[in-house]
Amino acid sequence: SKDSDHDLYRDNVAERPKVVFNANTGKFVMWLHIDSMDYEKARCGVAMSDRPEGPFEYIDSFRPNGQMARDLTVFVDDDSKAYLFTSSEDNAVMHVSELGDDYLSTTGNYSRIFVGRLMEAPTIFKNEGRYYFVGSGCTAWKPNAARSAVASSIWGPWVELGNPCRGE
C-alpha cells in the first residue's frame, strides 16, 4: 500500500504468513504477523482468497482477545475447528485462540500456555490423537535449540519434551 497508515505499507512489518483452507466457506484464509518497525503494534492480520496462491484480499488486523500477537501459526483440527497460536504478552506466554467458523476472527475462547517460557516460531501438528508443538526460544535472529511439547487437548496441559532435533 502507498498509504503510510495502512498495515501493509512498505515501512511496516508483515511476516510469517500462514494459509489454511476453510472447507465450510471454500476460501483460503491467511493469517500473518503485522507490526511496526519497533514491534510495538503486535497484531495479527487476516486476508482471504479463492485460491491458495492468491490474490488475497486483506481484511484487517487486530490483537486477538485484546492481547499482543507476534509469531503465529494456525492449526485446523480433524473436526474443522481452527486455532490460532500466538506469541503474546511480550513473548512471555503463548496463546491458543479458537477461531470462528469462517476462520477470520477469534471467538474469545483462549488459553495461556507455556507461561514465562518465552517461545516463538510455533508449529502445531496432530498424530494419533495427540497434539505436538515445536518452536524455539526468543533470541531474535540468534540461533537457539528447538523446543517441543505434547498435549492430549489443544488447550493443554502441555508437557515439554525438550529439543526434538538430533545431530551435530
Image (cartoon, grey):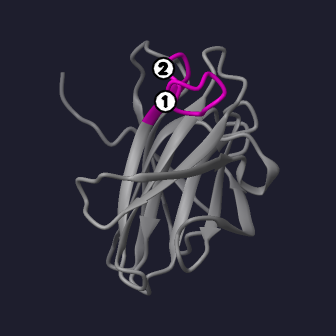
For the residues labelled 2 and 1, say whether their Cβ atoms are less than 8 Å apart. Answer: yes
Name the kind of residue labelled 1 in the image. Answer: Ser
The question of residue 12 being in magenta is answered with yes
- Quarter of the figure with residue 35: top right
Magenta range is 1-15
Q: Is residue 40 left or right of residue 131?
A: right
Which of the image's four quarters has the C terminus?
Answer: top left
Graded by Cα atoms within 10 Å as few (under 14), some (14 to 19) or many (20 or more), the crowding at tag 2 reads few
Q: Would residue 112 appear left or right of 168 to someone viewing this image?
A: right
For the point 71% across and 34% down, the residue is 92
Question: Is 119 drawn above or below residue 5 in the view shown?
Answer: below
**Residue placed under numbered mark 2 in the picture:** 10
Mark 2, mark 1: which one is toward the viewer? 1
Provide the secondary structure element on which disc 2 rests: loop
Indicate yes or no whether the magenta region holds residue 9.
yes
Q: Earlier in the sequence, mark 2 or mark 1?
A: 1
